[in-house]
Image (cartoon, grey):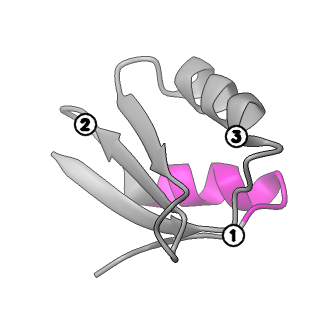
């Protein structure tokens, strides 16, 4: 399963956000595409919970919403 999110993550915080997400969701493959206008976050894994990922990102002050 792959979930795709729109974010406001910037290059300046990318490493921190990636490391934090990988620690919080260790069974998922996490990638960003900051070249895309929506600053895409892709999360792949067997049990991806979009709501938990968006909630975690929002708690730390980042916009994160599922792209449909």
Is 55 in the magenta?
A: yes
- Determine whether 24 is above or below 57 in the image: above
Disc nearer the start of the sequence (1/3) = 3
Where residue 26 sits, quadrant-wise, is: top left
* Crowd around label 3: few <14 · some 14–19 · many ≥20 (10 Å): few
Relative image position of residue 41 (x, y in whole percent): 46, 53
Q: Nearer the viewer, mark 3 or mark 2?
A: 3
Asked whether 52 falls inside the magenta stretch, the response is yes
Residue 63, above or below 60 = below
Q: Residue furthest bottom?
A: 68
Q: Secondary structure at mark 3?
A: helix
Horizontally, residue 61 falls left or right of residue 8, namely right
Q: Residue at x 15, y 45 (%)?
A: 1
**Residue at horizontal 79 percent and vertical 55 percent from the top:** 59
Which label belongs to residue 14? 3
On the picture, is 29 further left or further right than 31? left
Residue 63's label in the rendered image is 1
Magenta extent? 51-62
Residue placed under numbered mark 2 in the picture: 47
Residue at x 70%, y 57% (from the top left corner): 9
Q: Position of residue 21 (x, y in %)?
A: 59, 32
Mark 2 secondary-structure assignment: loop
Residue 38 location (% of width, % of height):
51, 74
Q: What residue is drawn where x is 28% and y is 82%?
A: 68
Q: Nearer the viewer, residue 27 or 18?
A: 18
Q: Residue 18: percent from the left, percent from the top?
A: 61, 32
User: Mark 3 vs mark 2: which is more N-terminal?
Assistant: 3
Neighbourhood count class around disc 2 (C-alpha, 10 Å): few under 14, some 14–19, many 20 upward: few
Instruction: Name the N-terminal-most of marks 2 and 1.
Output: 2
């Amino acid at each position: 399963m792959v979930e795709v999110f729109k974010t406001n993550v910037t290059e300046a915080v990318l490493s921190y956000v990636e490391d934090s997400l990988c620690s919080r969701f260790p069974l998922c493959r996490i990638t960003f595409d900051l070249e895309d206008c929506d600053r895409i976050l892709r999360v792949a894994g067997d049990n991806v919970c979009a709501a938990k990922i968006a909630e975690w990102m929002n708690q730390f002050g980042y916009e994160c919403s599922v792209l449909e």
